[in-house]
Amino acid sequence: MTVFTGKNVVVGVCGSIAAFKVAGWVSTLTKMEALVDVAMTPAAERFVTPLTFASLSGRKVYSAMFDGAADGSMAHIDLGREADIFVVAPATADIIAKLAHGMADTLVTTVALVARCPKLLFPAMNVQMFASLPVQENLKKLRESGWTVVAPASGSMACGEVGKGRLVEWQDAQEYLAAALSRQDLAGMRVVVTAGPTREAIDPARFLSNRSSGKMGYALATAAARRGAVVMLISGPSSLPAPPLVTLKRVETAREMHDAVMAESAHAGVIIKAAAVSDYRPENIAPHKVKKENIETEMRLVQNPDILFALGEKKPKGQILVGFAAESRNLEAEGRRKLTKKNLDLICVNDISASDAGFESETNRILLLDRDGGEERLPLISKLETADRILDRVVALRCTP
Ligand code: PMT
């Protein structure tokens, strides 16, 4: 189950070389169980055939204004009326001008006038065209009338120029679609999430760390941003790409994570500590790589700050503090102990003895324990679904004084 499952997504495709990329979007949305209807402008059909979109969506593709008129149906009304979300991509300078001025000369512009759902526009065009005054003024108009305009990406263009004008990649686009389809119950809320491991250097080549991939924390940041939160993700070393719509601060050590979290904590409405912070670090860091014959078999360690404990000690009124616990036995008792000791509102206990949960896995199975004695066992679900379930609890806790 995804945020797209069962949703009616209407995609208006326009005449740009980037139209072929939107074929990939339609294919992915369909795989994510959305019902995708494609409406094409006549110019779009010169770049990609309707058959391509029909094959990928498994549904009829609309192009002519009077498609279906013979059987009494009205495509321009029906598509606009039934859409949960209307996406125009790639949006050319021409369609942007037409939409800004309320023209109704193609199926895409007509559907736009009928649709009352969230409307998203993904411009793609030559760099100079995009920067031109008329296009910028038309985009401003569209923003003012409720459209979400997603700025194009920078890079090299089919026309040979380099700059801002490329259609954004699906990885970014999908977050805007998902946000438009998600309930905005964290709108404007400042949420700080920590993710990944920390690394504690031994010498320039070696470090102490753990198996955290960052997946759980990145999923929480993504889910919170989709629900309208202003998200700061503070991440230890991770190979995951920066989630769109999220501010990412990369750190390496526990002390760097401590400083970054503390700098954000006073203004945060919610802090979620999914990071696996190293409890200890080597007392001394060798300035040069230690030769193996010189490595000591015993290493002196010193304790790192417990960031969560420090947050719990000075938690402002109304702030929701969420911890994680990675446990392989006595899950509930250990979870309750940490919840109380660190003055948390909620703790998410991972059973790290299972291969399908906890470190590195795509899925998680979490026991949620809250400050009021409440307990909820989440089933084995994706980390993104787990993140949403945790955020549901956060929203509920915010409503209970
Ligand atoms: O990143 P993934 O591969 O997706 O894996 C996810 C995860 C297993 C890392 C994550 O779900 C998780 O359980 N994170 C917490 C792991 C952990 O460090 O647990 P802990 O029981 O040692 O720590 C308890 C809490 O105190 C945690 O919220 C931790 O962030 C925090 N802590 C711990 C030590 C420290 N010095 N400072 C802290 O803030």
Image (spheres, rainbow, N blue to C red):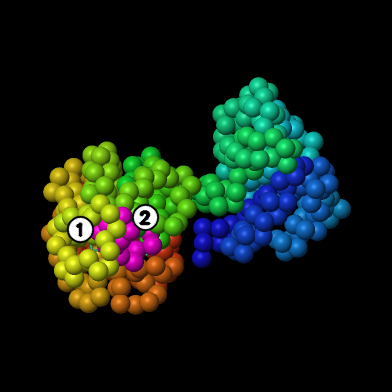
What is the magenta range? 199-214
Residue at position x 57%, y 31% in the image: 143
Horizontal arrangement in the rendering, residue 339 relative to residue 377 (left or right):
left
Residue at position x 59%, y 27% in the image: 140
Q: CA distance from mark 1 to mark 2?
A: 16 Å
Horizontal arrangement in the rendering, residue 187 relative to residue 5 (left or right):
left
Q: Which mark is residue 258?
A: none
Q: Amino acid at mark 1?
A: Arg
Q: Is residue 256 above or below residue 147?
A: below
Q: Is mark 2 within 8 Å of ligand 1?
A: no
Q: Which mark is residue 281?
A: 1
Sequence-earlier tag: 1 or 2: 2
Badge 1: residue crowd in 10 Å (few <14, some 14–19, many ≥20): many
Q: Tell me if I can see residue 265 in this picture.
A: no
Q: Is residue 12 within the magenta segment?
A: no
Closest to the observer, 220 or 35 = 220
Residue at position x 46%, y 50% in the image: 243
Q: Tell me if I can see residue 337 in this picture.
A: yes
Q: Which mark is residue 237?
A: 2
> In the image, residue 118 lies at what x, y percent?
57, 43
> In the image, residue 120 lies at what x, y percent?
60, 42
Q: Is residue 205 within the magenta segment?
A: yes
> In the image, residue 23 lies at what x, y percent?
70, 55
> In the image, residue 146 lies at what x, y percent?
56, 34
Q: Amino acid at mark 2?
A: Pro
Horizontal arrangement in the rendering, residue 334 relative to residue 234 (left or right):
left
